[in-house]
Image (cartoon, rainbow, N blue to C red):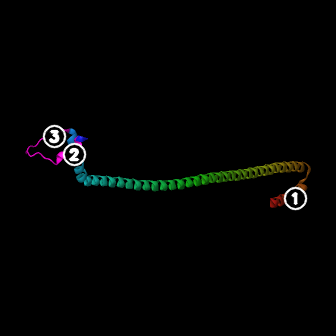
């Protein structure tokens, strides 16, 4: 400690010789040199350091601002995407519901039209059967009538004379005319 105070005291007494040299006493010279260097650095480096720190602070603030803007943009895009997703999901649900109801409606229409076609086919079948039955009945009637007529003519020819024969033919012609008008 004495050396430190001696160095301050000896600071006032400069040697009168004009020589320049190095003081090798580390304890006497180092704190003074350090305090002078630190003082100069603080005095001159304060502005540069504060400018560097201000620039760094501005870059950090700009980066934060940019990241906040990007974050807000990303949040906005996310919200838009979520809104579009909800809209698409609602449309998909509606298409699904409409599709199912449309399928059910088409299924019912197909079943109804199939029943109508089957009913029409059944009616056509019944009409065809009735027509064929009526035709068969008419053919049977004609044959029976022809056979009866031939049998009657055979009986008449064998039993009748010419006068009776002519009267019977006239009567039969009248009957045929009446039947023809009825048919």
Q: At x 85% / y 58%, what residue is drawn?
A: 175
Horizontally, is 23 left or right of 152 in the view?
left
The residue lying toward the viewer, choosing from 8 and 67, is 8
Circle 2 is placed at which residue position? 32
Q: Which mark is residue 23?
A: 3
Circle 1 residue: 171
> Residue 6: x and y, percent?
20, 43
Q: Are marks 3 and 1 in contact (CB under 8 Å)?
A: no
Residue 126 placement, left or right of 52 = right
Q: Nearer the viewer, mark 2 or mark 1?
A: 2
Circle 2 — which element?
A: helix
Crowd tier of the residue under label 1, counting other residues whose Cα lies within 10 Å: few below 14, some 14–19, many 20 or above: few
Query: Relative to 21, does residue 119 appear above or below in the rendering?
Result: below
Label 3 and label 1: CA atoms lie apart by 178 Å
Label whose residue precedes the other's in the sequence (3 or 1): 3
Residue 5 within the segment the image draws in magenta: yes
Quarter of the image containing the N terminus?
Answer: top left
Q: Which residues are magenta?
A: 3-25
Sequence-wise, which precedes: disc 2 or disc 1? 2
Q: Position of residue 34 (x, y in %)?
A: 23, 45
Tell me, yes or no, whether the two marked residues, 2 and 3, touch with CB atoms within 8 Å. no
Tell me: 148 left or right of 126.
right
Front tag of 3 and 1:
3
Label 3 crowding class (10 Å Cα cut-off): few <14, some 14-19, many 20+?
A: few
Residue 14 or residue 109, whichever sits in front: 14
């Amino acid at each position: 400690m004495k050396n430190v105070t001696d160095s301050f005291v000896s600071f006032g007494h400069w040697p009168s010789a004009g020589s320049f040299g190095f003081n090798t006493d580390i304890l006497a010279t180092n704190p003074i040199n350090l305090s002078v260097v630190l003082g100069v650095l603080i005095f001159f480096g304060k502005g540069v350091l504060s400018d560097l720190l201000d620039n760094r602070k501005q870059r950090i603030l700009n980066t934060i601002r940019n990241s906040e803007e990007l974050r807000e943009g990303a949040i906005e895009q996310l919200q838009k995407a979520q809104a579009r997703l909800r809209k698409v999901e609602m449309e998909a649900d509606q298409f699904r519901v409409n599709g199912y109801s449309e399928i059910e409606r088409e299924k019912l229409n197909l079943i109804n039209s199939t029943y109508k076609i089957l009913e029409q086919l059944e009616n056509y079948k019944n009409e065809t059967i009735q027509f064929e039955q009526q035709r068969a009945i008419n053919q049977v009637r004609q044959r029976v009538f022809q056979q009866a007529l031939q049998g009657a003519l055979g009986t008449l020819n064998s039993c009748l004379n010419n006068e009776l024969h002519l009267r019977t033919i006239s009567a039969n012609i009248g009957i045929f005319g009446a039947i023809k008008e009825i048919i």
